[in-house]
Each structure stands twice: as structure tokens, then as C-alpha cells.
Image: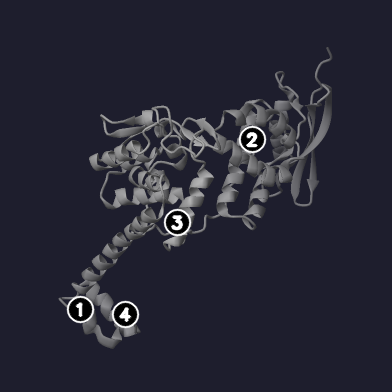
Amino acid sequence: MARKRFESGYIRLRGSTTRAGKGEDILLPDGRIVRKRRGRYLGSLAELPTKTLAKRKLAEIVAELNDVDYKPRAVVTVAQFVEDKYRTLILPVRKPTTRRGYEVVLRQHVLPELGTSQLVEVTPERVQSFINCKAGSVAWNTVRNIRTVAGAIFSAAVKYGYLKSNPVRSVELPFEPVKLLPLLPSDEQLQRLLDELPEPYRTMVWLVCISGVRIGELLALRWRAVDWDRTCFWVVEAVDRKKFYSPKTHRSRRPILLADEDMKRLTEFRRRTPTAGDDDWLFLNKRGTGPIHADKALEKLQAAAKTVGISYITWHLLRHWHTTVLHDEGVPMKAAQDRLGHADAHTTMKHYVHLSRGAERQAADAVSQHFRNSGDGKTWSEFGSKFGSKSGVEGSAVAVSS
């Protein structure tokens, strides 16, 4: 066997920057090993003012190629790796909803941009440029999903020895814009919604509101999951497009405790379906072959909401309503986190708790009362028409600080 050729590389000055050239052995799909010349940016003249410094940096780069344990890197495009490895080894062990979401991002964004590129030639600069370009044309959440999916692909490439490092790891997301949370339905609106809905959709809305379960968890509920003695039901599975799987996180497998009055209502709902066995779903479709489809349930929910004047509603928004009620009633965040099945309390607080109308009014009244009681007993009306003018602002500042 021939001894591997030693690689020393070369240095070239281009304008005000220094570039290095090196030969790298690569493994072709047919098994042949060939040497390919690659260029690489070393730095500017300000960073590398002497040839000695440039050579020192070049030596660090070619040291890996000259290592006795060095193995030629395989030549494979991003699209080939996704098809041959990622879709066969990684995606099959993900949740159905995750697989479907990743496939959409791959098909619409990642593969059209990076698919024809060699894995080894995708740099952090290339990915950052891709992300920046997308930021001007799609929603911020979509940009975040693109980085997540691209990062997962290159992480798998590192795992299986195709790359030494993940070029997406150092890529930054653009600034996240401020987005208002959707308005939650009021108690009165929810009651009108319940009155408008037929069964079993009325009970479905009620159960999501009092338990905070995800729609996939709700539809997968079977009667054997209801613990009548402990007044709770157990979330042990979820359903998505007729496929059943374990819940979203390890914390999602959980008991949901219900009040005694709510257990009575659930008992009454069971009484109206006397033929249902323990292995049957709570919310069967008309054919009795499985649970109601999530799309059908959403269609019924939104049609009834439109009738009673609720402009926007989803099953997930009802989950937010549940969390906000817990927060307003002073329920400890840990209890809310466990009830919702979140892996951490940060998710519960940041994304699920809305400022309710009552809390907004309480905040406004508290600040107003504080200002009215400040200033040696003066009230805002005593400042008269000066309020809002320059002198009025200065006067009110003195009153507040005293």
C-alpha cells in the first residue's frame, strides 16, 4: 500500500486578504479516493501581517490532513444525505407531528437552497446568508424552524462521520419581532359557545377548558384512562391523523385531577354512551371505528365560535385559556407546568399565560390609585390644565417623588 502523500498547502495574497490552498483526499461514491484542491480564507493583512504568521495558521489547517488516522471525507450532497440517511435513520424515530413538520421545512426551504451543495462545502457563512435571506420573506417562526431542521441534518452528518462540525451551530436568528398573543374568549363567550355546540363537541370543549390537555391527547382518551376512585384521568397516548403515539414529552404522561363536580359531569356523559367499553374512546366518530378526527373537531369548534361572535379560536387557544385561569387564581407555576405536561416552567409562563382582562384592569386601577394618593394628598384633577404641558409634567414629577 502506497504511503499517503504529505500535504503542506500554499499561501496566496489576494487584495488585502490572505488565502490558503490545500489538497484534500475525498471518497467518491464509487469507492475511489482522489485529491481535490480546496481554498480557504485565512484572514486579513491586519490579522496576519507576516508570512510566518500565515504559515503558522496554515499548518494548523493541514495538520488534520497529515494525521496518520485521517480518513478521506465522503462526497455527498445535502439532498443525498437527507434521502439516504436522515429520512431512514433519524426521522422514523421522531413523533408523527415532528416528522410532518420537518418534511414541510425540508421540501419548501432547506433542500431548494442547500440540496445540491456538498455537505463538506456548506459553511456557517453560507447558512447565515440563507437564514438572513429567508428572514425578509417568511415569518420569524418559520425562520427558526428552518434553522432547527438544517441544524438537525448537519448534526446527524457529524454523528455519522460525514462532518467534523455542524455549520449551523454558530448561525444566529434575526431579532424576534414583538407579537401580540391572541385574545382569549371571555367566560361569557365560552358559555355561549358551549350552548351552541352539539355533543360530543360540547363536552370536548368543556374538558379541554378544565384540564388543559392537548387536542391529540383529548381525542386519544379511552374510558379505561378515567380513574373514578382518584377522580382523575391519565394521559398516556396521543393521536395524530389516525396514528397513536406516546405524548410529546416524558412529563406529558400524567394524571389530570378533576373536581368532584366535574367527575359527576363526566359520569353523566358516560351514562349517555352505555354501549361504550373500557377500551373505547371517549369521543368516537360516527362509524365507531376510532376517535373523531382533529380537523373535523376544529371545523365544528370554529363554526360554532363564529355563530356566537368569537372571531378567533383553536383547541390550543383553549389550552392557553386554562393556563391563564390557573395563573390568575394563584395556582403555583409548578402545578400548572405538571398539569399541562410541559418539560419546563419557562414554556408555561412565556407562551401560555395571557394577561386577562381582569388582570389588566387590576393593574390599571392599582397604578392610578397610587398616583392619586401621591403628592401630599393632591389628586390629578388638582393639577388642572397644566397636565400634559411641559410645566405640568415637571409639576407632576415633583408630586410623584415627594
Image-based side of 114 in relation to 223, left or right: right
| Of the pair 87 and 177, the residue shown nearer to us | 87
Mark 4 touching mark 2, by CB under 8 A?
no
Q: How far apart are marks 2 and 1 (CA)?
A: 63 Å
Determine if residue 180 is in view.
no
Percent across and percent down for residue 260 are 23, 39
In the image, what residue type sits under mark 4? Val
| Of the pair 296 and 109, the residue shown nearer to us | 296
Residue located beneath label 1 in the image: 379
Please give the count of numbered marks on the rendered protein.
Answer: 4
In the image, what residue type sits under mark 1? Thr
Q: Check residue 304 in the rendering and tell me which mark sits there, or answer none.
A: 3
Of circles 2 and 3, the one toward us is: 3
Of circles 4 and 2, the one toward us is: 2
Q: Check residue 153 in the rendering and tell me which mark sits there, or answer none.
A: 2
* Rendering quarter of residue 225: top left
Percent across and percent down for residue 382 are 21, 83
Mark 1 touching mark 3, by CB under 8 A?
no
* Rendering quarter of residue 365: bottom left
The local crowd at label 3, few if under 14, some if 14 to 19, many if 20 or more residues have their Cα within 10 Å, is: some
Q: How far apart are marks 1 and 3 (CA)?
A: 48 Å
State the residue at coordinates (51%, 51%): 299
Q: Check residue 393 in the rendering and tell me which mark sits there, or answer none.
A: 4
Instruction: Looking at the image, tell me whether mark 3 or mark 4 is earlier in sequence order.
Output: 3
The local crowd at label 2, few if under 14, some if 14 to 19, many if 20 or more residues have their Cα within 10 Å, is: many
In the image, what residue type sits under mark 2? Ile
